């Protein structure tokens, strides 16, 4: 499973609604294009649930963005800046057994859910992947939830998926990561720190069809897909519904 989708443009100011249309001066001509690698652990006999994997992927993106190595003069800061200064492309691959152990030995951060494990790595040039990541499979296994996910706890940030779109697990993991990143950009420094200190609680859920139009028109961050794979360019895939972006905790849109 894979996705190399684009959402939003980073810059000095991040508007609540992000689109994937490139700015005329970004990226600079000849500048390398970066992508954020995410690897989900999929052991043959114990695959994680789909929602658990989506939530772990979204948290992994947030954990990397908040890591001291990605900030200031940290060792990852320049590549993270260069990646965020253009399209925020993410690629999701899968690994098991020795593949996972080799991936886990590379610089990065592993985030665990209830069963899911997702490792996020500092951005790499689109054509310059480490060989132990480049060789990982990018298609095949799909994920399912053993039971329907319940209602998110009151006050939990929710990444709402478009109910009209069918996306593979890898595609949806990348889109959830985009949504989490747009929420992070839109928050104040104090709200970012509060979210980080709490361990980045979040939920990923599919919105009720009747609620989707209201969510996309609410002023909350919206992911618009670049259309590289699976769905049409410009499709709205995720709305990032963080209570701090509305000022109060929100009821679930189910």
Image: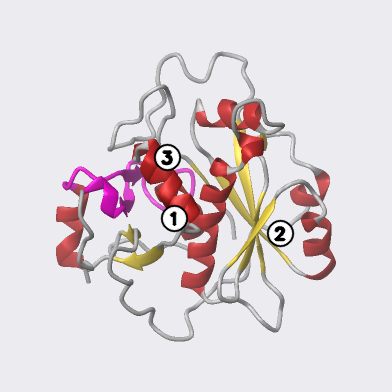
Inspect this view and state whether residue 19 appears.
yes
Please tell me which residue is depicted at 79% across the width and 42% down the height of the picture. 130
Q: Does the magenta run of residues contain 222?
A: yes
Front of the two marks 2 and 3: 3
Q: Secondary structure at mark 2?
A: loop
Q: Secondary structure at mark 3?
A: loop
| 89 lies left or right of 74 | left
Residue contact at pointers 2 and 1, CB within 8 angstroms: no
The residue beneath circle 3 is 7
Q: Residue 165 at what x, y percent from top left?
A: 34, 61
The residue beneath circle 1 is 176
**Quadrant location, the C terminus:** bottom left
Front of the two marks 2 and 1: 1
Q: Does the magenta run of residues contain 35?
A: no
Main SS, magenta residues: loop
Is 30 above or below relative to 94? above
Q: Nearer the viewer, residue 192 or 11?
A: 192
The residue beneath circle 2 is 137
Please tell me which residue is depicted at 21% across the width and 67% down the height of the picture. 253
Q: Residue 178 at what x, y percent from top left?
A: 44, 47
Question: Spatial distance from mark 2 to mark 1, Cα to Cα?
Answer: 20 Å
Please tell me which residue is depicted at 17% across the width and 62% down the height of the picture. 211
Is 38 above or below relative to 97? above
Region in magenta:
217-246
**Quadrant location, the N terminus:** bottom right
Please tell me which residue is depicted at 54% across the width and 74% down the height of the picture. 143
């Amino acid at each position: 499973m894979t996705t190399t989708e684009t959402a939003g443009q980073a810059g000095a100011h991040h508007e609540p609604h992000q689109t994937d249309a490139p700015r005329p001066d970004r990226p600079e001509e000849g500048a390398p294009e970066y992508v954020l690698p995410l690897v989900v652990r999929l052991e043959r006999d114990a695959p994680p649930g789909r929602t658990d994997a989506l939530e772990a992927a979204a948290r992994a993106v947030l954990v990397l963005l908040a890591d001291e190595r990605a900030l200031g003069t940290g060792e990852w800061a320049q590549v993270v800046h260069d990646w965020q200064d253009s399209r925020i492309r993410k690629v999701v691959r899968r690994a098991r057994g020795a593949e996972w152990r080799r991936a886990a030995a590379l610089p990065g951060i592993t985030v665990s859910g209830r069963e899911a494990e997702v490792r996020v790595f500092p951005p790499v040039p689109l054509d310059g992947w480490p060989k132990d990541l480049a060789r990982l499979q990018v298609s095949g296994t799909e994920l399912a939830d053993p039971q329907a996910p319940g209602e998110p706890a009151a006050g939990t940030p929710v990444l709402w998926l478009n109910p009209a779109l069918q996306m593979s697990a890898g595609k949806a993991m990348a889109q959830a990561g985009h949504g989490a990143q747009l929420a992070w950009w839109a928050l104040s420094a104090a709200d970012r720190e509060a979210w980080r200190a709490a361990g980045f609680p979040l939920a990923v859920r599919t919105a009720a069809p009747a609620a989707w139009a209201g969510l996309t028109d609410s002023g909350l961050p919206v992911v618009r897909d670049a259309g590289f794979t699976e769905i049409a360019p410009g499709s709205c895939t995720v709305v990032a519904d963080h209570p701090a972006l509305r000022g109060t905790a929100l009821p679930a849109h189910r």
